[in-house]
Amino acid sequence: MVLSRRKLLRRAAGGAATALVLGTGGAILLRGFDDDASEDSSTTLPPGLRRAALDVHVHVLGAGTWGSGCWMSASMHGSIPVKAGLWNLRLRHDQPDLDQAYIAYLRSRIQSAGFLRQVVLLAMDTIWTAGGERDLAHSQYYTPNEYVAGLARQYPEFLFGASVHPYRADALEELDRVAEAGAVLVKWIPNVHRIDLGDPRCRAFYRRMAGHKMVLLTHSGDEQAIPGVEQRYGDPRGLRAPLEEGVTVIAAHVASLGEREGRSNFDLLAEMFPRWPNLYADTSALTLFTRWRTLLRLAERTDLHSRLVHGSDFPLPPACTLFLGRMPLRSTAAGMKFWRHG
């Protein structure tokens, strides 16, 4: 499917607005840990919300089963967070069909959520050195562009989100390849990939992205889910470089963690929106234990709502119980009952 940048943002923005309106009840829409994955809740939704939204932030994880090409470091694959996370998805880290079972489970969650039409599946490049060499020793996991592109061709509910490190020697050629394969965006985690967004060598990459009309979905703020990060690369002010080159940028997580020079990353990002009409942010992971306070702040910043797009950061689990007692109990209970039982 060919999806223009405008359509991508418009559809995802509809999902963000829905999430803000639904509040706590919306936090379990893609969870699937305590409801029936085979149940289709679209019949209980208002007609305008049925199969209407786009999730721009869904990760593809795998261990390389059945030739997927995915890879995790030994420390990550056997870690307690990965084991616990897969257990929550009713999967095991050592099962022989892990990669395929993960995709099957994800598709069942999209179906049962009801409000989703499509999700952007995200590839994940490895770290590359300043000299243009792959750095597997410091990389935690890898999801190949080819694997994700193939899933997008196979299943209509998936869109291809590529990941191309700008320091690799063939960065521009790989960007052309993924664009030809139908990628709608490029995903980076600069803190993990060790990408300096303002590095002059990235300018040609940004210009090529703008020429392809591809969106840059990039982590903003601090990163706490993956070890071995360089937090300085999460400074949202670094987004000025791709914005200056005409790239449409989605700042993942609304820079909801960390601070620079005594100011929160969220505030630094928020003051950039009036200057840059091609700047957006996604709502991914804002219902995690570490980020929920920013969700409350964001709900009050109505001036920013038109610049938000929906992202879940699946498979990271939401924690909707954090909002019990912070919203009227009747509204909270009614919303959760609606989304769980229809």
Image (cartoon, grey):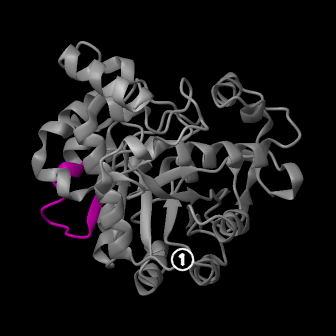
Quadrant housing residue 78: top right
For the residue pair 157 and 159, the one nearer the viewer reads as: 157
For the residue pair 239 and 232, the one nearer the viewer reads as: 239
What quarter of the picture does the N terminus occupy?
bottom right
Where's residue 139, x and y in %?
A: 69, 47
* Residue depicted at x 62% and y 56%: 124
Where's residue 189, x and y in %?
A: 50, 52
For residue 99: magenta?
no
Quadrant housing residue 292: top left
Does residue 187 appear to the left or right of 27 in the view shown? Answer: right
Where's residue 174, x and y in %?
A: 64, 78
Residue farthest toward the front in the current orientation of the protein: 43
| Tally of numbered discs | 1
Quadrant housing residue 147: bottom right
* Rendered position, 163 above or below 258: below
* Rendered position, 3 above or below 283: below
Judged from the image, the secondary structure of the residue bearing numbered disc 1 is: loop
Residue hosting label 1: 1
Does residue 33 appear to the left or right of 262 in the view shown? Answer: right
Majority SS type along the magenta span: loop
* Rendered position, 288 above or below 42: above
Q: Residues within 10 Å of mark 1 (few under 14, many from 20)?
A: few
* Residue depicted at x 68% and y 63%: 151
For the residue pair 122 and 74, the one nearer the viewer reads as: 122
What quarter of the picture does the C terminus occupy?
top left
Asked if one can make out residue 298 in the rendered structure from this viewpoint, the answer is yes
Which amino acid type is shown beneath numbered disc 1? Met
* Residue depicted at x 27% and y 27%: 293
Does residue 269 appear to the left or right of 322 in the view shown? Answer: left
Asked if one can make out residue 72 in the rendered structure from this viewpoint, the answer is no
Residues rendered magenta in the picture: 269-281
Where's residue 116, x and y in %?
A: 45, 53
